Image: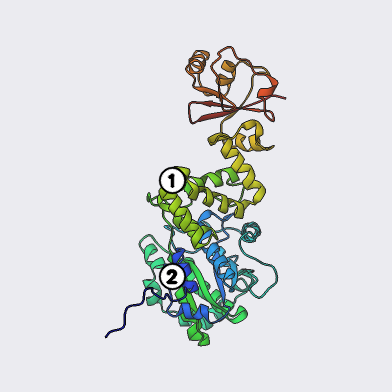
Amino acid sequence: MPASEPAFTIREPMTLLDDLRWRGFVHDATRELAEHLAGGSRTAYCGFDPTAPSLQVGNLMPIMLLAQLQRAGHRPIALMGGGTGLIGDPSGKRSERPLLSKDQIRANLQRQRDQMARFLNFDPGPSSALLLDNAKWLVEQKLVDFLRDIGKHFSVNVMLQKESVQARLEGGLSYTEFSYMLLQSYDFLHLYREQHCTLQVGGSDQWGNITAGVDLIRRVEGGEAHALVAPLITTASGAKFGKSEGESIWLDPEMTSPYRFYQFWLNTDDRDVIGYLKTFTFLERKEIEALEEQMKSNPGARAAQIALARGVTEMVHGTDALASVVSASQVLFGDFDPRQAPAGVFGILAGEVPTADSPSATPTLVEAVVAAGLVKSNGEARRSIEQGGIYLNQQRENDVNRKFTSADWIGGYALLRKGKKDYALLRLKK
């Protein structure tokens, strides 16, 4: 008599690569990477382009991938391209970009270093992160020695087949950018020799460059190295990830305000939010699955978007900035009484909504609405007030003869609203 089937299925333990795949980090990987990662603490690196003064949210995918590897006991290296940044990577570019000066590259490197520290742990320890600059070994490289020792291992025919090169051949590709693959491969070889680095990670458009480095290590050192690339993110609507109204979302608060940064994540499409929670936060699977169930049962609450916006904003800008932007958001879009808002909230809003100076300390409501630019004339202001469409500090006002008092000014500002979405701040003249 055949044995009965078991009442349950025994599942194999999830490997690190399985978890990374669940989180959306795996587009392609070299064979036996799972076994390699399971064999002990490894060193992995990712390169970052220093040609902008700040990282963008598009850079968060590889940063979070390094952070996940570190949390699993591996050592991450954030390699700043102080050397390769002087050349420029053709991957994903339609044309060759202008080359920056060494001083510009150096300034950008310093700002990006500070941003990296919010995600990676640089404190001394076995998996302590390293932040290196490839200018240290590339700038002093002698051309003839480089061509003799490294260039001989590259076939032009193979290089021409790489996707990053193919995409640019028709429009033109300089020898400067064509040589980028050799430089990036040499970076991998150098880190393999000096830091025992055996894994390079990046975006899927980097697959050709990364595997070229894997091959170089095998040819020169007879060593084992691996590649892991994450998919390039696009939104469910087809828009490019990391853009808001056509503008890039930066990690630097001077380039993208923490309030606007928070709103970017808060406005995530329902179709994207669970995937973003997996990739851009450290929430555990149970927490994310609970948010997914809550989204299905009560989509209007937008709990998943709130968790995403709070989590990423706190990592990038800190706890104090998060508290301020949450309060500012609640003042505009929630039931939060503006009079109970923490100090400085209206200063934040002044940079995000239209702001105008008040004609006096005690303007009439009609004068205030016109001065704020919510209407074009006194007559239109009176009609809007009579119809119940004007709010002062989130309180509906119906009195066309209403005058401001000292209590209407909160930290030197008054919040006006017409209808549901048209906001303006009136600033008290000193």
Q: Residue furthest bottom?
A: 222
Q: Please tell me whether mark 1 sits on a helix, a strand or a loop.
A: loop
C-alpha span from label 1 to label 2: 40 Å
Q: Secondary structure at mark 2?
A: helix
Residue 118 vertical placement versus 202 (above, below): above
Image x and y of residue 147, in percent: 52, 79
Q: Amino acid at mark 2?
A: Trp
By what rule are the colours in the image chosen? Answer: rainbow
Q: Are marks 1 and 2 in contact (CB under 8 Å)?
A: no
Left or right relative to 16: residue 259: right
* Percent x, y of residue 298: 43, 45
Above or below, comparing residue 39 to residue 169 in the picture = below
Q: Position of residue 114 (x, y in %)?
A: 66, 58
Q: Earlier in the sequence, mark 1 or mark 2?
A: 2
**In the rendered view, does 248 fall on the left or right side of 321?**
left
> Which image quadrant: the N terminus?
bottom left
- Residue 298 is tagged as 1
Q: Residues within 10 Å of mark 1 (few under 14, many from 20)?
A: few
Residue at 51% of width from left, 85% of height from top? 223
Of 251 and 388, nearer the camera is 388
Q: Would you call the spot at circle 2 few (<14 residues within 10 Å), some (14-19), or many (20 or more)?
A: many
Is the C terminus in the top left, top right, bottom left or bottom right quadrant? top right
Judged from this view, the residue extending furthest toward the left is 1
Which of 161 and 191 lies nearest the eye of the viewer?
191
Image quarter of residue 86: bottom right
Inspect this view and state whether residue 286 appears. yes
Q: Which image quarter: residue 355?
A: top right
Amino acid identity at mark 1: Asn
- Please report the residue visible at 50 percent of the width from the left and 83 percent of the height from the top: 224
- The mark closer to the camera, 1 or 2, is 1
In the rendered structure, find residue 207 and report the number of the disc placed on it.
2
Looking at the image, which residue sits at the far front?
1
